[in-house]
Image: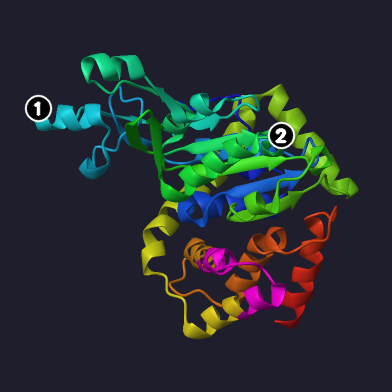
Amino acid sequence: MNDRSIYPFPAIVGQEEMKTALLLNVVNPRIGGVLVRGEKGTAKSTAVRALAELLPGIEVAAGCPFSCDPARPDALCPDCARTLAEQGSLPSETRRIRVTELPVGATEDRVLGTLDLERAIRQGERRFEPGLLAAAHRGILYVDEVNLLEDHIVDVLLDAAAMGVNTVEREGVSFTHAAEFVLVGTMNPEEGELRPQLLDRFGLCVEVRGADQVEARLEVVTRHAAFEAGPETFRAQWSQAGQDLARSVVAARELLPAVRVPEGVLRQVVQLALDSGVDGHRADLVMVKTARTLAALDGRREAGREDVRRAAALALPHRMRRKPFQQVAAGRGKVEQLLARA
């Protein structure tokens, strides 16, 4: 059942770059998540919750805290694997995509989960209390004010997002479970920056700000007033647009494996990465994945130069070298100059 308190995703005024980055990641989670930077009151959390409601439901093993996929017997948790072995099948149910929120004060045990060492030693059983990464599996992990988290917690999140698994080890006892999720971090740069090493680990990064035109701001106010006055009526007005967008996401997921990137386009990616002076190869890889996904969302089987230009604007600015105390936004201007010459 739809939650009448959730604002419709297509009804969000402006913020097109943020909406595009979110859609790209739900079509292709291998892009590596998105960091949304900007002032308060710019629809960051609204967009994340609205996006989850937009997506089709998923089939999960009934009662499983890890949301195991019955269609993937190779990635089942120990309990589901045991049930499958004993009964020959897994009872399943369909549920909506979850948004798991990570609080700023979360401990490492709360994020990763904990092992009952006493039970493991005395009884030889691995008893695992699932954490937030387990809850986020096959959904969206939303981290508001990610810049205020301890660096080692951010490292843990980014490692799990990149690997798709979470491994907890305590005194020689370990437990591993699947942890595939779309990572969305939001932050207000005025409250502090992330270290460059952590910024680089986010696939895409977008800047959001309040509308600076009268008509746009008026539209924001008008739509929110209509939503608060009658949520069900307002949601019904945007229902068709939401359904169309959901179908485009499903179609893009199906098309994505068939999308190719010609050599000339790959050369454009590499040259942009070299010209921007980024470290390593992550920027190149993310640009290719993003360009392919943009093509898939557009219903095309081949990524082109314009896809690379759009991908570069999302994947390069936060990875560019900056002087001390220089804002990430400074990289955006340099990327725009590079794209103007590309």
User: For the stretch drawn in magenta, what is the main secondary structure?
Assistant: helix
Q: Is residue 174 above or below residue 32?
A: above
Q: Residues within 10 Å of mark 2 (few under 14, many from 20)?
A: some
Q: Position of residue 5 (x, y in %)?
A: 61, 24
- In the shown orientation, is residue 133 left or right of residue 10? left
Residue visible at 58% across and 53% down in the picture: 201
Tell whether position 272 is magenta: yes
Image point 79% across, 70% down: which residue?
Answer: 334
Q: Residue at x 66, y 34 (%)?
A: 149
Residue under label 1, please give it: 86
Mark 1 element type: helix
In the rendered structure, which amino acid carries the disc numbered 1?
Glu
Question: For the magenta stretch, what is the residue range?
Answer: 271-288
Location of residue 242 (image quadrant): top right
Earlier residue among tags 2 and 1: 1
Residue 223 position in % (x across, y down): 74, 36
Could you give the CA–CA distance between mark 2 and mark 1, rounded to whole angstroms? 46 Å
Q: Nearer the viewer, mark 2 or mark 1?
A: 2
- Say above or below: 266 vs 209: below
Instruction: Tell me, yes or no, whether the highlighted magenta stretch contains residue 287.
Output: yes
User: Residue 48 or 158: which is nearer the viewer?
Assistant: 158
Left or right of 176: which side holds 266? right
**Residue occupied by mark 2:** 148
